[in-house]
């Protein structure tokens, strides 16, 4: 468990610099490109759309971390009462992630994990087993992934729907974002299995040294480029909704 000193160090050295940097960029791009007189999110060049999406994601990630750490510090005197038990919000460092699945499993917060498990993952597994005729103990990975992301898409889209004043089409950006991530997880797992199967076959047939590991040095490089590219590309749907709802304007202090 992080100590109070650990949390204060994290806030000062990691969280506040990222938060300030992302806030400054959001304010700069809003004033320079997305103010009421100049245009909307889709009027931005593609590169600026990706940078805005990255800044928004970094801002939210650091803001969640700041709030979590501050509450943990305030409630730490209650120890050993359960209210003082604040596990780390993020269980893996961003630069160590190598897949979209890894990001959502370890790189992002799990505050709603129980909700998505009960109302998404379990129903998704049940549906896949029913459709495919699988036994209860057989894995249902596709249903698990799709169910989890569908439930997440519904929760975030419902929140967005209220912010957009009940306009359904303006609330669909979050749904597209999580749907895209769900598809990406299925695709990357399929590619990974095909690659590992091919490498195992090469090893068995003697094309590869039996002492050579199945993973390659470039797997991590490709994985990092993949998950960052996916989140930024499909994340534009999320950013577009936040800009249209006026949330980026409020975050920028305007």
Image (tube, rainbow, N blue to C red):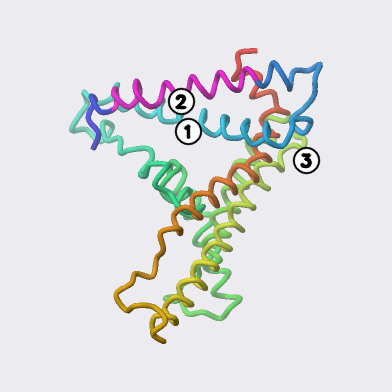
The residue stretch that appears in magenta: 7-28
Contact check, label 2 and label 1, Cβ < 8 Å:
yes
Q: Quadrant of the N terminus?
A: top left
Q: CA distance from mark 2 to mark 1?
A: 9 Å
Residue holding disc 2: 18
Give the label, 2 or 3, closer to the camera: 2
**x and y percentages locating residue 172 in the rendered image:** 72, 43
Based on the picture, tell me whether residue 246 belongs to the magenta stretch: no
Contact check, label 3 and label 1, Cβ < 8 Å:
no
Residue holding disc 3: 169
Q: Residue at x 27, y 35 (%)?
A: 85
Q: Residue at x 56, y 30 (%)?
A: 55
Q: Quadrant of the C terminus?
A: top right
Q: CA distance from mark 2 to mark 3?
A: 32 Å
For label 1, the crowd category at 10 Å Cα-Cα, with few meaning under 14, some 14 to 19 and many 20 or more, is: some
For label 3, the crowd category at 10 Å Cα-Cα, with few meaning under 14, some 14 to 19 and many 20 or more, is: few
Give the label, 2 or 1, closer to the camera: 2
Secondary structure of the residue carrying numbered label 2 = helix
């Amino acid at each position: 468990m992080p100590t109070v000193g650990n949390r204060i160090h994290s806030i000062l050295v990691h969280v506040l610099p990222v938060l300030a940097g992302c806030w400054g960029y959001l304010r700069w791009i809003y004033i320079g490109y997305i103010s009421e007189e100049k245009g909307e999110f889709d009027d931005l060049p593609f590169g600026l759309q990706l940078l805005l999406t990255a800044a928004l994601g970094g801002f939210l990630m650091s803001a969640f971390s700041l709030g979590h750490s501050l509450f943990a510090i305030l409630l730490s005197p209650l120890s050993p009462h359960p209210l003082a038990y604040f596990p780390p919000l993020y269980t893996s460092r961003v630069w160590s992630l190598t897949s979209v699945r890894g990001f959502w499993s370890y790189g992002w917060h799990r505050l709603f994990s129980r909700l998505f498990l009960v109302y998404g993952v379990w129903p998704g597994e049940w549906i896949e087993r029913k459709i495919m005729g699988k036994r209860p103990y057989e894995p249902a990975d596709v249903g698990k992934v799709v169910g989890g992301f569908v439930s997440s898409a519904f929760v975030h889209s419902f929140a967005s729907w209220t912010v957009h004043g009940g306009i359904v089409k303006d609330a669909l950006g979050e749904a597209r974002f999580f749907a895209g991530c769900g598809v990406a997880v299925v695709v990357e797992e399929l590619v990974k299995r095909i690659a590992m199967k091919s490498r195992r076959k090469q090893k068995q047939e003697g094309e590869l040294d039996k002492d050579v590991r199945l993973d390659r040095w470039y797997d991590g490089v490709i994985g990092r480029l993949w998950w960052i590219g996916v989140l930024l590309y499909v994340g534009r749907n999320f950013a577009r909704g936040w800009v249209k709802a006026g949330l980026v304007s409020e975050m920028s202090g305007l």
